[in-house]
Image (spheres, rainbow, N blue to C red):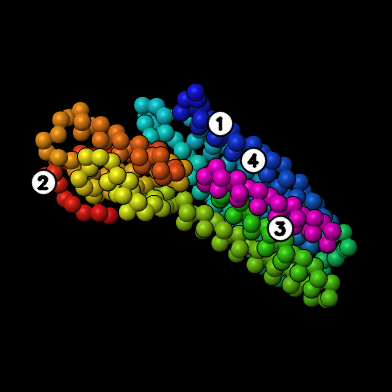
Amino acid sequence: MNTVSDNIQLHYGRIRRVLIVILVLNWAVAAAKIIFGQLTHFTSMTADGFHSLSDGASNIIGLIGIHFACQPADKKHPYGRKKYETLFALGIAGLLFIVAFNLFKEGAMRIRYPQTPQVEPASFIIMLGTLLINFFVMRYEYAKGKALKSDILVSDSLHTKADLLTSVSVIAALIVTKLGFPLVDPLITMFIALFIAHSGLDIINKSSHILCDRAAIIDIQTIAALAMKVSGVKDCHRIRTRGREDDIHVDLHVQVAGHMQMDEAHGISHAVEEEIKQNIPGVTDVVVHLETRGSSGNKEEK
């Protein structure tokens, strides 16, 4: 039977393999866009290439993050280290902001000092090809992130999702530039920069919920109903939750009869814990506070 540590290593090993595959694809896409964008002086294509390059860099950040997250619990980290994955997701957001700032500045400079980019048939081929790759990468990574409940993979897939819109924008810029409107190219570059910054804000919003111990997305009434199913439970209140989707912590107060023996009461506590863990995916820790019927504990559900 696998230990908890073995299961954690197996879980993060799967995430690591996904990130490595995505890293190779992202950097291949980035190289094609940047090289051809530089050769044709097409700034929005080059900007999109650097966006893809930042995707690869975020994959590396993710690999570092899961290295720390998969370490077992110890005396200094009794709750484990899974929040490292969420913390490093913020690093991806920071990288997005840096890329967005530089691209916006580049677009503004091109408006001030305009150049006429070259539009070649190969430009359309490269952009359409990389668009298809990005679509596959985004769908694959997001699906794996949801299946593995990984903040790193879901956040990184949002980063890659931005590539889809930016690539479509670059294709539109190619068409409009070919029609004789080269100013559209730097404008699209600036639009891409704003979209990248928006993706960064989205990652920060999601990560902050976990790091600040916002209540987990679980119906409190469901927890109460599961606790009340256990024989001997008279009431259940003061239910609190927190944590990542794959590492939810629950604590609650349970009332039992005042004449109950200590070992019997602890048996009920254990049964409540197991009932919640078995019926709510992602719950890894349940703390049950026992109260006797009629005790002075505040009776309020949150």
- Residue 223 vs residue 71, the one in the foreground: 223
1 and 2 marks in contact (CB < 8 Å): no
**C-alpha distance separating marks 1 and 2:** 47 Å
Write down the residue under mark 3. Answer: 48
* Residue found at the very far right of the displayed protein: 121
Q: What residue appears at the point 27 percent right and 46 percent down from the top-left corner?
A: 228
> Disc number at residue 10?
1
Task: Residue type at mark 4: give it.
Answer: Val
Figure quadrant of the C terminus:
bottom left
Look at the numbered disc 3 and give the secondary structure of its residue. Answer: helix
**C-alpha distance separating marks 1 and 4:** 13 Å
Q: Nearer the viewer, mark 1 or mark 2?
A: 2
Left/right placement of residue 1 relative to residue 299 reads: right
**C-alpha distance separating marks 1 and 3:** 35 Å
Write down the residue under mark 2. Answer: 294
2 and 4 marks in contact (CB < 8 Å): no
Asked whether residue 70 is drawn in magenta, I would say: no
Mark positioned earlier in the residue sequence (1 or 4): 1
Mark positioned earlier in the residue sequence (1 or 2): 1
Task: Using the rendered view, name the quadrant where residue 195 is placed.
Answer: bottom right
**C-alpha distance separating marks 3 and 4:** 23 Å
**Segment tinted magenta in the rendering:** 124-153
Task: Residue type at mark 3: give it.
Answer: Asp
3 and 2 marks in contact (CB < 8 Å): no
Write down the residue under mark 4. Answer: 18
Q: What residue appears at the point 65 percent right and 67 percent down from the top-left corner?
A: 191
Look at the numbered disc 2 and give the secondary structure of its residue. Answer: loop
What is the tally of numbered marks visible in this picture? 4
Q: What residue appears at the point 37 percent right and 54 percent down from the top-left corner?
A: 219
Mark positioned earlier in the residue sequence (3 or 2): 3
